[in-house]
Image (spheres, rainbow, N blue to C red):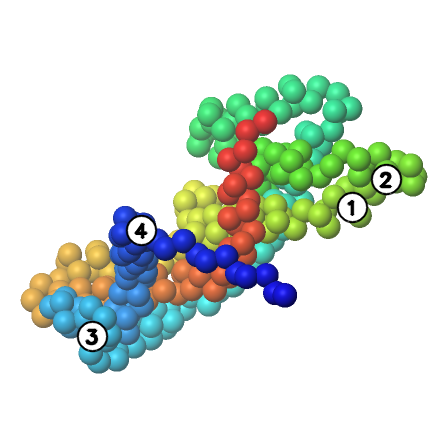
Amino acid sequence: MKKEKKKRKPRSKSEKVFDFMNVVLSTLLILVIIYPLWFVIIASFSNPQDVASGAVWLLPKSINLKGYTTLFSQPLIWRSYFNTIFYTVAGTAFALFVNIPVGYALTRKDLFGRRWIALMYVIPMFVSGGLIPIYLVTKQFGLLNTIWVMIIPFSVSSYNIIVARTFFQQSIPEGLWEAAQMDGAGTIRYFVQIVLPLSKAILAVIGLWTAVGIWNSWFNALIYLSNSNLQPLQLLLRQLLITNQTLQSQATGDVAQQLQQTANMMKYASIVVSTLPVMCLYPFLQKYFNQGAMIGAIKE
């Protein structure tokens, strides 16, 4: 005879009210997060007069692509877009190449001076040498106005190293190293063939953090790049918006109003253009991102 299914205990009125409030609060929180993003997207396609009057709040009343046409008509827009993609891909790859091995090395008990080396990585998280010394060092190495200034000098991240070290300590059993030694594997072979394939989560997390940081970065380019052909997208968009605001302040009457509308449309279009690639990439790495955030919160 089939076992009788246990009857589910009827839920109390307080539990139903609690679940209902959770659903309501979660829905409101989702709307608060999603609506600003949605508004920026529809505003970039809308007539600026409709946006200014408050007529656009859910869907665009009329399609207007002037912001995008004005933005993409800039002579350096595609060059800066390519520069940003190159800096992001190359910078992320180099950062992983630097930070991941260091994070693993700090987990090895046979590393001489391991605690002192870890301390040397922690200190820069709280104390910085300052902008001028960093600029002078970068200049002495001949990195100014080169593509490498956006990749090499700022690739080391103490926080990423600590997160990677925590991951290796918590997720990679010490028995794997002992088994690899019995099979004749050395440290480098063990790290490349065994540790890295088991570390896809932390690779994705640190890669995502680094890529987003490089993609949104403009201050380093402002300080270390004076060649307009090497400037990234974010810096070019900033300069375009500042130029429009300057022209608007110097104009009067209908000209000033027209410049204001063009500046608003370019502002919304710039946000969409600069954030769309990251927004498309994030859903594929979200599970790794969440896992890495939990890893970073674990204390030794």
Residue 234 bears which disc, if any? none
Q: Position of residue 87 (x, y in %)?
A: 54, 54
| 65 or 285, nearer to the observer | 285
With respect to residue 183, does 120 lie above or below? above
Q: Residue at x 71, y 19 (%)?
A: 113
- Residue named by callout 1: 194
| 132 or 300, nearer to the observer | 300
Name the kind of residue labelled 4 in the image. Answer: Ser
Total numbered labels = 4
- Rounded to the nearest angstrom, the CA distance separating label 4 from label 2 is 56 Å
Q: Is residue 31 left or right of residue 4?
A: left
Q: Nearer the viewer, mark 3 or mark 1?
A: 1
Callout 4–callout 1 Cβ contact below 8 Å: no
Q: Identify the mark nearer the N-term, 3 or 1.
A: 3
Q: Secondary structure at mark 1?
A: helix
Name the kind of residue labelled 1 in the image. Answer: Ile
Callout 2–callout 1 Cβ contact below 8 Å: yes
Q: Nearer the viewer, mark 4 or mark 1?
A: 4
- Rounded to the nearest angstrom, the CA distance separating label 3 from label 4 is 52 Å
- Residue named by callout 3: 47
Name the kind of residue labelled 2 in the image. Answer: Ala
